[in-house]
Amino acid sequence: MNILEANDLIAAKAEDILLHYAANILPNGFKAQVVAVSRRAAIRYYEAFGKARTKLLKRIDLLDPQLFNLPEDEQKNLDEETRFLIIAAKNRDMLKELEFAAIISGDHNDPPSYKEHTDKARHEILVGKDGRFKRHLDKDALAVIVVKSMLLVGFDAPVEQAMYLDRFMQGHELLQAIARVNRRYTEKTRGLVVDYFGVGDRLTEALAVYSQEDIKGALINIKDELPKLDDRHRRVMGIFSERGIADISDIDACVDVLRDVELRAEFISKFTEFAESMDIILPRPEALPYIYDMKLLGFINKTAANRYRDSQLNIAGVGNKVKQLIDEHIIAQGVNPKVPAISILDKDFEKEVSEIKSKKSQALEMEHAVRFHIEKHHNEDPAFYKKLSQRLKDILDTFHDNWEALGEELRKFIRESKKGREEDQTGLDPKTQAPFLGVLIDEFGTKPDVQEMKGFCEAVVDIVDHIRQEIGVVDFWRSRHAQNLLRTWIINEIDDRNLIPFDKQAKLADRFVELAKALHTRLIRS
């Protein structure tokens, strides 16, 4: 007991814990718990963390600036401590603001210095009713709590990812303690237990009361993750190597392979698994040989997401340690990872397309940009965008792999598409009335003659005027009753005017109401 309470030993462990925390847990915004041998040791840990933080910040400041320019995949020759310091330096500002707390039970013989750590009111502020320790570090600076026995059972702390054990524990107490770090949380794949006391054998004994099937995968040595990391790396790389791409630095070729939507789904699944394993192993040296490929795969993912306007190509669930490395590489390539793909409506669209080196890549960029534009605005004018979609298909079928000619045709098509529906001989407003006429003609099924067209236009003007009045009522779209009344009115109006057969009237009314919702802002402002 006296040895484990020694100030010098606790100070050394606090420095080691804080450096490990800063490099492994802090980058993802999670928190940690230290289990000390006694209440006195818990208080000494609390005091030691403040000094350890000051020392860690000084060590970061003394690092050779050249080290920060050294790519992560070239850091394998550095010692582990230096690599940890480089990672900690990236979160220096956050590290400066971290808070620590010792939370222990009280006794009537306690010295006055114990009071702030045994005060139940303070405990409640820190981890009580408002659940501050349930909150991510971006909302709460309390990062590490030190305990002896408190908060090991029943403390629900999903943002706690690491537990540093520094006292003897066994049986259910040990299992309950470890369960603290295993609570599910967004971007948290698993908890981490760092054993300073040597309770590993006791854990095996504690788990022995359960069946092997129940505890399978419950406790994994981090070294056992290495084969999984290698396997996941080979799987995601195989998506390209199996299709004749030996070097994934050929970004255009890799992105072209991902034209197939099902293959993109397979890619993001395998890439996410690989990134999760990297997040677990980093910053251990075993992960360093894979960093170059991880960065390239991340850039391929971002480029494909932009080109194909595919929202499934995101790694939102991956830890910040990995995302930060990928984002840094993407930024170095001149791309802002937070900026979405450029729209065909952007004034710089043609300029950005022309800067793409490959004619094929230019054509693919335009194809998927206009596809996205059509899909995004389809509900605002279904008939018009249905025609655009068909025209796009015709262009693609006609020019197919003639990339230069296809590119020129797509440029012309995009210029026309940007204009949207324009005024025509009907005299209807192209933004608010013509879309309803398009739906009406679509449901009619054939091209109307002159007299039918006149009747259609007159009906659309009257129906749109009525729709505009109805949807202008506050909370109209929250009232199913109000929407049903409008739908019934439209059916009666269509029937009275004998616009289309009876069996199509209900569907047309539904489509009119859906269109009114899509055009709500335009209709009430016009």
Image: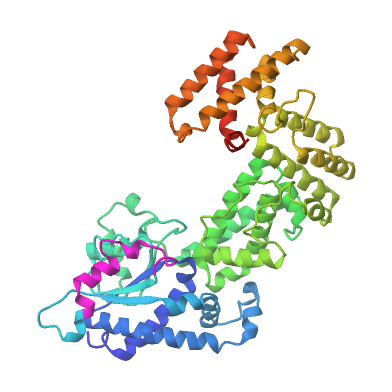
Quarter of image, res 444: top right
Q: Residue at x 37, y 70 (%)?
A: 32
- Span of residues in magenta: 116-140
Residue 28 at x, y percent in the picture: 48, 66
In this view, the residue in front, 323 or 243, is: 323
* One can see residue 290 in this view: no
- In the image, 66 versus 413, the foreground residue is 413
Residue in the image at 67% along x and 59% along y: 299
Q: Position of residue 409 (x, y in %)?
A: 86, 39
Q: Is residue 447 left or right of residue 117?
A: right
Q: Identify the residue shown where x is 33% and y is 65%.
A: 133
Q: Is residue 127 above or below residue 401?
A: below
- Would residue 293 be counted in the magenta stretch? no
Horizontally, residue 40 falls left or right of residue 273, namely: left
Give the quadrant of the C terminus: top right
Give the side of residue 301 with respect to residue 174, left or right: right
* Magenta run includes residue 126: yes
Q: Position of residue 327 (x, y in %)?
A: 62, 64
